[in-house]
Amino acid sequence: MKIAIYPGTFDPVTCGHLDILRGASKLFDRVVGAVGINPGKVPLFPAEERVTMLREAAAEAGLVNVEAVAFAGLTVDCAREWNAEYIVRGLRAVTDFEHEFSLLLANEQLDNSIQTVFIMPSVNYLYLSSSVVRQASEFGRRIIPGSVPTCVEERLREKFGF
């Protein structure tokens, strides 16, 4: 069985994340959306709510071989915990490459038995990031149509009252 993890903050989950998960779910038997807990970041949503949103969004998208969990620590340790031989990372643009390449090199040094696989989202999501969605919501703007799954849109509306 080919198992992959797709680590990220997912704060909030976007349709771009789901697009990457959709691609990964076709390549792997099981995909674990690994919601990272980073003490250096102050997330909009707590980890358990991000896990719940990721689960709901995957179900909404019909991704039956995708699950969601929270993790703290190194990505390679999370991969080991879930018996994953692959780490899935999304690449939106050339600007993402340098950061992603440095993560790949670090992860290879930590555990070279775990391979990183890059998946590009469809062109509709190349511009999209959680930061853009979060900032627009925080400033009371409507959610960009098609940027987040319905379950996430509902939570953003509740949080910001629009």
Image (cartoon, rainbow, N blue to C red):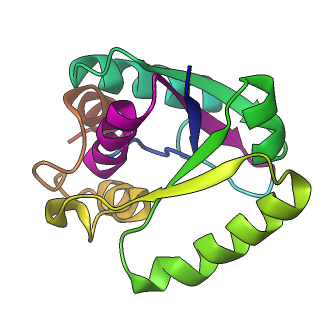
Q: Is residue 102 left or right of residue 124?
A: right
The x, y position of residue 4, in whole percent, is: 57, 35
Residue 149 highlighted magenta (yes or no): no
Q: Residue at x 89, y 55 (%)?
A: 110
The quarter of the displayed image where residue 119 is located? bottom left
Q: Quadrant of the N terminus?
A: top right
Q: Is residue 99 left or right of residue 31?
A: right
Q: Nearer the viewer, residue 109 or 46?
A: 109
Q: Residue at x 38, y 56 (%)?
A: 138
Compared with 158, 137 (above or below) is: below
Q: Quadrant of the C terminus?
A: top left
Q: Nearer the viewer, residue 50 or 122?
A: 122
Q: Residue at x 10, y 51 (%)?
A: 145
Which residue of the protein is positioned furthest toward the left in this rendering? 145
Q: Residue at x 71, y 76 (%)?
A: 102
Q: Is residue 122 left or right of residue 160?
A: left
Compared with 50, 137 (above or below) is: below
The quarter of the displayed image where residue 127 is located? bottom left
Q: Which region is colored magenta?
A: 15-39
The x, y position of residue 29, in whole percent, is: 45, 22
The x, y position of residue 13, in whole percent, is: 39, 41
The quarter of the displayed image where residue 135 is located? bottom left
Residue 30 highlighted magenta (yes or no): yes
